[in-house]
Amino acid sequence: MKMDFAVMEALELLEQERGVPVETILSALANALVSAYKRSPGAAEEARVVIDPNAGDITVYAQELNEDGEVVREWEDTPDDFGRIAAQTAKQVIAQRLRDAKREQVFDLYEGREGDLVTGIVQQVDHRYAILDLGDAEALMPGSERIPYERLERGNRVKGLIIEVRGETKGPQIVVSRSHPDFVRQLLMLEVPELLDGTVEIKAIAREPGHRTKIAVASNDPNVDPKGACVGARGGRVRQVVNELRGEKVDVVQWRADTGQFIGEALGPAKVQDVIIDEDDRSAVVIVSEHQLSLAIGREGQNARLAAKLTGYRIDIRSNEKEVERPEPEAAEVAVEEAADMSAAGEGAVEAVEESVAEESAEESVAEESKPAEEAGAEETEAPEGAEEAEPEAEPAIDEEEDGEA
């Protein structure tokens, strides 16, 4: 039985375009034809299929095996309608080999590319993951690797960082991320040539995806300003990174060999007055002015938290304002007791005054009540004013009588 000439041409074309060897496809086709032969009526339990790649001849040899599995007899047993079966099987095998070859090519293409940037078109999005079409492969972006609150719509063109390439039975799986700190590193390297040639180096990155990122950079050339090189003229270079991150803030700080200076740079834009380092505890006490305290800490502590991640030190931020002197506990208790005594004395004095005022009021009211009665008695007992005036005149008369008697 001869294989269709068109099938042989297709095999040769696959080898040229896809790099799949014809021998590999013919070997897979022979195995598939053996399975197809065993399903035909009256077929032997064991058989083998031989395909001549030059002539396209297909021959089936039935086999008889002994107890040890050795072939004791072999004869040709190609079914009459095996040509139709071979054609259908060949199509299936070729399609399968094409899928396998594509998977192998994709795996070979992306294997070892962890950390590289890729650009894809969003094909599918839900709360669990997003699928990106990379052109020659598909990439998977889990929900945990997406930027929080970022909306990815179907058809959007986005970038992602390859973090893993898995070789699975269903094909290689490329996992990408947009929340990884190195995603910002690679985006900045696209915009800053000095990072590619090694003139400027990224020393550390601290990121809270969707909110803010701090990048510490250093220069290997004393004539190059690392911070200015990354920011660009009027912030043009870093602005491209911010746009790709959908508005996430990016702070570029200069790395310092001195830990205290580096911590001060990391807390920017706040201005630091002093830094006290404890190397044993890997902690630092940072002194700032009162009006710089909230800026150094940041919203919900974000600035201080990112600075700690960037430097690797636990940071305690304090104000330089002197604390209000407070009395000692014992002195405070004495003061409280004295205040209580004074308060009690004041209350007693107030009560005494209130009592005296009440007594005076009572006396006045009694005097007022008794006054009419006294006036009435005076009217009855006291002589009229005329009698009072006549009484002094009577006394001399009495004296005269006394003198006469004498």
Image (spheres, rainbow, N blue to C red):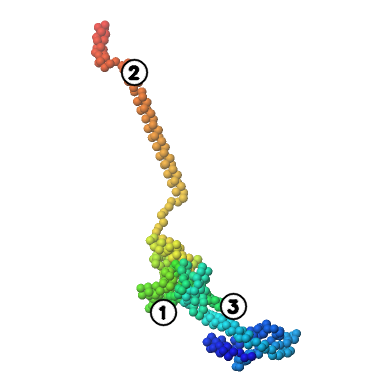
Q: Can the viewer see residue 307 in this picture?
A: no
Amino acid tagged 1: Pro
> Of marks 2 and 3, which one's residue comes earlier in the chain?
3
Q: Residues within 10 Å of mark 2 (few under 14, many from 20)?
A: few
Front label number (1 vs 2): 1
> Of marks 1 and 2, which one's residue comes earlier in the chain?
1
Residue 267 appears left or right of 175: left
Residue at 34% from the left image edge and 22% from the top image edge: 372
Q: Is 318 drawn above or below residue 3 in the view shown?
A: above
Q: Residues within 10 Å of mark 3 (few under 14, many from 20)?
A: few
**Residue at image mark 2:** 377
Numbered badge on residue 59: none
**Residue at image mark 3:** 169
Give yes or no for contact between labels 1 and 2 (Cβ–Cβ under 8 Å): no
Q: Is 294 drawn above or below residue 243 in the view shown?
A: above
Amino acid tagged 3: Thr
**Residue at image mark 1:** 193
Helix, strand or loop for disc 2: helix
Residue 173: image location, x then y, percent: 54, 76
Helix, strand or loop for disc 1: helix
Q: CA distance from mark 3 to mark 1?
A: 40 Å
> Which residue is most to the top?
405
> Of marks 3 and 1, which one's residue comes earlier in the chain?
3
Q: Is 259 drawn above or below residue 334 in the view shown?
A: below
Give yes or no for contact between labels 3 and 1 (Cβ–Cβ under 8 Å): no
